[in-house]
Image (cartoon, rainbow, N blue to C red):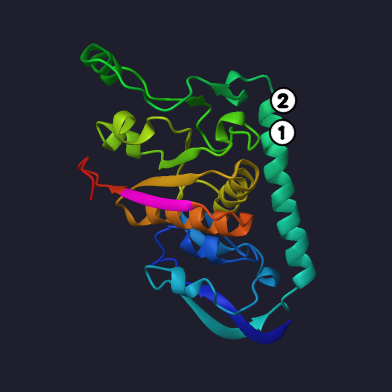
Amino acid sequence: MAMRKIIEIDEDRCNGCGQCVIACAEGALEIIDGKAKVVNEVFCDGLGACIGECPEDALKIIEREAPEFDEEAVKKHLDRKGAESGAEAHANAACGCPSAVPVLLRSGPPTASTASDEAARDEASELVSWPVQWRLISPQAPFLKGADILLAADCAPFAYPDFHRSFMRGKPVVIGCPKLEEQMAFLDKLEIIFREARPRSVSVVMMEVPCCGGLLALAKEAAKRAGVPTDIDSVVIGIDGRVK
């Protein structure tokens, strides 16, 4: 133990948005029971990269007695997290559950059609691939290769009444919640997806609530880590069902 700089979290201010988790390259922070927490003090380098990402000013650097920062422990921690993410994807695919088997439901861009075709399409699903939940999707799924991927907060389709036609047409979908999910695992999975699939573009549809902004941050950080020059745009849906 030694006197050194380390992060301190004001849990009364923290809203669990997860922005700090994404910004912490050492994996020292996780969202636990809806609040950001330091999972192990030896992972925190005390440099405060996470502070500027907090919308609630819940983080600050203090100086107190704490275990020394351990770079080797950080490396093992990050390697383990990456391995767990890959093992989970493999287990999902191997379990025999239909929700873990990649399926292309339809392909190709929309074609010219008659009025009756359009009317039929208005009532049809625009889902082009399965599964859609990020934990179940295989990064090697053929429908992700070079695609225009839609990354959506899992509340958004319930809030926006015309979600299928407005956002999903011709795009494989990846859904998740940036507050309820384990952010580092979510980030690791997106990084692998982007590296393997090299998508042409990524569209992020998120809710207006503060914690949902973490979804866009996850997408940008994953693309950066994967070294993929992906075009990322975003749309915010209000809880009143309107585009903000």
Q: Residue 178's spot in the image, x, y percent?
A: 46, 49
- Which residues lie in the magenta part? 231-235
Residue 24, visible in the rendered structure: yes
Residue in the picture at 45% in, 74% down? 52
Q: Which residue carries the number 1 mark?
A: 90
Residue 33, visible in the rendered structure: no
Which amino acid, mark 2? Ala
Residue in the picture at 48% in, 74% down? 51
Which amino acid, mark 1? His
Q: Which residue carries the number 2 mark?
A: 94
The single residue placed furthest to the front in the displayed view is: 112
Location of residue 107 with respect to 77 vertically, above or below: above
Q: Is residue 213 left or right of residue 208?
A: right
Q: Residue 204's spot in the image, x, y percent?
A: 40, 47
**Camera-nearest residue between 198 and 46:** 198
**Camera-nearest residue between 53 and 216:** 216
Label annotation for residue 162: none
**Camera-nearest residue between 104 and 200:** 200
Using the rendered view, name the quadrant where residue 237 is placed: top left
Q: Residues within 10 Å of mark 2 (few under 14, many from 20)?
A: few
Q: Residue 21's spot in the image, x, y percent?
A: 54, 61
Residue in the picture at 54% in, 65% down? 23
